Image (tube, helix red, strand yellow):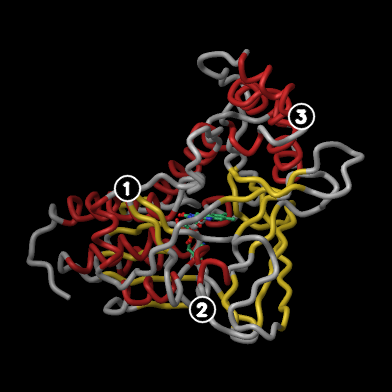
Amino acid sequence: MSAVAVVGAGWAGATAARLIHDAGYPVHLFDRDFSVGGHSKSGTINGVMFEPHGPHVFHTSDVTVMNFVRRFGIAHDYAHHGLTEIFLDDADEKPRLLSWPPQVGELKDLPLWPAIEKELAGLPEVPSTKNLRDYCVGLMGETLFRLFIEGYTIKQWGRDPAEMSSTFAPSRLDLRADGNRRMFKDSWELFPLPSAQAVIEEMVRPIPATFGQELGAGDLPELERSYRAIVITAPLDDFLGLPGELEWRGIRSVSTYIPLEDPAGTVTAGYIVNQPSLRRPYTRTVETKHASGQSIRGTVVTEEYPGAPEKHYPVPTPDRRYERANERLQDEIRQVTSLRVFFCGRLANYVYINQDVAIGQGMACARQVLEFLGTFPGTPEH
Ligand SMILES: Cc1cc2nc3c(=O)[nH]c(=O)nc-3n(C[C@H](O)[C@H](O)[C@H](O)COP(=O)(O)OP(=O)(O)OC[C@H]3O[C@@H](n4cnc5c(N)ncnc54)[C@H](O)[C@@H]3O)c2cc1C
């Protein structure tokens, strides 16, 4: 009998599988896709690297996570500078390129600065967490909220910011006066080359895997014959065949290849340029060549259009209704199988997490699995 089936070969599942394998227990990896990497996977068009599932900078302050991924070849230091294109009002014809998060030093050059300055002087000590709108206005004032956040949020989530929870805001929104244009403040920041999936491939190299197979609750009786435990990193509404139980927000990426004479050439201002204006139907442009540093006569620019039926972002409502629904789905799965079930990763936990946190969840999950397997007699073997 194999010890553990791991469903999903993104960062979370791959990490859990590798650590269980390293401890000497047989583990088998399944993925519905035909390769590893999950949501962090990149692709190429005419040889140019691009990111069909959104831009992915690897950043962490977790030394355990960093040491773990280094084993599998993650490299290429990178410093990400966020950018935003702003239209000041409806009459403004030419957008201005500003830093994201906004920098007070740059804002002083705007004709709107007197109003912004007045609002900043009247900010509360701690922003209200009642909803996303109140949090943002309390953090940066009404004008900056309107310029940088409001339109982006309406496009991204299809909701008014006043109807949204502020839970994710403190870790993602900021107003800076320090001149530090690096978006992330973590100890390590990298752009995985040649790709995140190459690092994950190396991680799972010794582990037997089945690709192109989507597992669901209907497969559990069969799995019970071969495994003692299952690690699920799949979305639980799909796993249980209950579409619509959880709400997700997805983006449609439209990627365009542009031939260039200069191998170092790019066409946009930066790797990621936010587009908060409602004049533009997309939320941002992504030109991965800025981060990859590829030397090639061409580039790919991706526009991100929100509202696609993909499971990219969980929807944060003030009453946490979908997080609670996901907990019920976890209980339901535990009840329908004799396998010991463990959940980790962004999908099975219905949570937006960065890659380092997904790896951390994979590590924590592996510890729980090993504790469980340690209760069985016999020596672990490959
Ligand atoms: C637009 C966007 C941009 C992002 N940018 C960043 C960034 O810059 N930096 C950062 O650190 N993080 C970023 N993230 C987060 C990052 O994508 C996640 O942290 C990471 O993908 C989580 O890995 P995971 O293993 O939990 O999930 P996934 O990568 O989604 O892996 C899940 C795997 O399970 C497989 N699977 C699903 N269901 C089944 C099933 N039923 N049977 C078999 N296999 C199944 C899938 O094919 C997939 O391979 C971003 C996320 C989004 C949405």
Residue in the image at 72% along x and 51% along y: 283
Residue 289: image quadrant is bottom right
Q: Which residue is mark 3?
A: 112
- Residue in front for this viewpoint, 105 or 1: 105
Q: Nearer the viewer, mark 1 or mark 3?
A: 3
Q: Whole-percent x and y of residue 191?
A: 44, 65
What secondary structure is marked by label 2?
loop
Name the residue: 29% across, 76% down: 207
Query: Residue beneath label 2, please?
Result: 34
379 to 275, vertically: above or below: below
Return the x and y of residue 137 as percentages of the image width and height: 65, 23
Residue 327: x %, y % from top left: 47, 38
Residue 117 at what x, y percent from top left? Answer: 66, 22
Q: Residue at x 49, y 58 (%)?
A: 234
Residue 61 - label? 1
Given residues 96 and 198, the one toward you in this image is 96
In primary-sequence order, the first of circles 2 and 1 is 2
Sequence order check, earlier mark of 1 and 3: 1
Disc 2 residue crowd, few under 14, some 14–19, many 20+, Cα 10 Å: few
Q: On the image, which quarter does residue 295 sit in?
A: bottom right
Q: Quadrant of the C terminus?
A: bottom left
Marks 2 and 3, the one that precedes in the sequence? 2
Name the foreground residue: 187 vs 135: 187
The amino acid type, in three-letter code, at marker 1 is Ser
